[in-house]
Image (cartoon, rainbow, N blue to C red):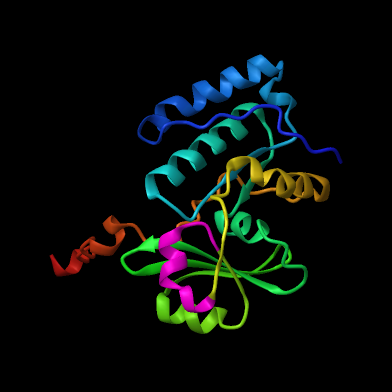
Amino acid sequence: MAQAIVATEVLPGRSSSERLIPAVRRLMTESGWRLDGLAAVVVVYGPGSFTGVRVGVSAAKGLSEAGAVPLIAVSRLALLAASVDGGEQRVHAVLDAGRGEFYYGEYVGRRRVREVLMSAQDVMMAASGGLVVACESKVAEALAELRPKLVEEPLAGDALPFAVERVASGRFENAAALDANYLRRTDAEIFAKPAVPRAAR
């Protein structure tokens, strides 16, 4: 199946939530496309910024529902792992998660083995002797002992091969059940006080 990126646009971070849907509408109009004529709506659903991921997933679910179009979600870690030719060997993709932690994904080809939140020490143990890939200098420096391959930050367009493969195999998401791929609970969830049972009030 032929693959080509027809149009692309990078939105400024702070205003992306307001500009996303208008930008999608404009690009589709310029390309002469209708929402209900798409094979699928694809979203990179994290891990990453809580707000950014939430906005992207919400927009994708809305477009999917509005056009009655199937939905496909692709992990940012999967895109990072796919940026290197690992063949059939294990590829360890690592992103900065802040607070001294890392988003870690283990892949063989495009098959996900696992994606978890890890400490630097755990990543060192899990990825020792393997092909490690990062797109942030901060991660490369922190894991220098693993000699990670530093690549460019994956872009949304890099999800195209994944999308084409998923459309061909008919593997789509349950749009109603899809949640962002945070790998970490939000601060609100971490610091929320447990609800007091009625009987104890």
**Magenta stretch?**
134-146
The quadrant of the picture occupied by the C terminus is bottom left
Of all residues shown, which one is farthest toward the right? 1
**In x, y percent, where is residue 174?**
63, 48
**In x, y percent, where is residue 49?**
40, 50
**In x, y percent, where is residue 50?**
39, 49
- Whether 113 is drawn above or below 69: the answer is below
168 left or right of 84 in image: right
The quadrant of the picture occupied by the N terminus is top right
Residue at the (45%, 57%) spot, across then down: 182
Comparing 122 with 144, the one in front is 144
- Whether 98 is drawn above or below 67: the answer is below
157 left or right of 135 in image: right
Comparing 126 with 116, the one in front is 126
Of all residues shown, which one is farthest toward the left? 201
Question: Residue 167 sits in which quadrant?
Answer: top right
Residue at the (30%, 59%) spot, across then down: 189
Residue at the (57%, 25%) spot, across then down: 24
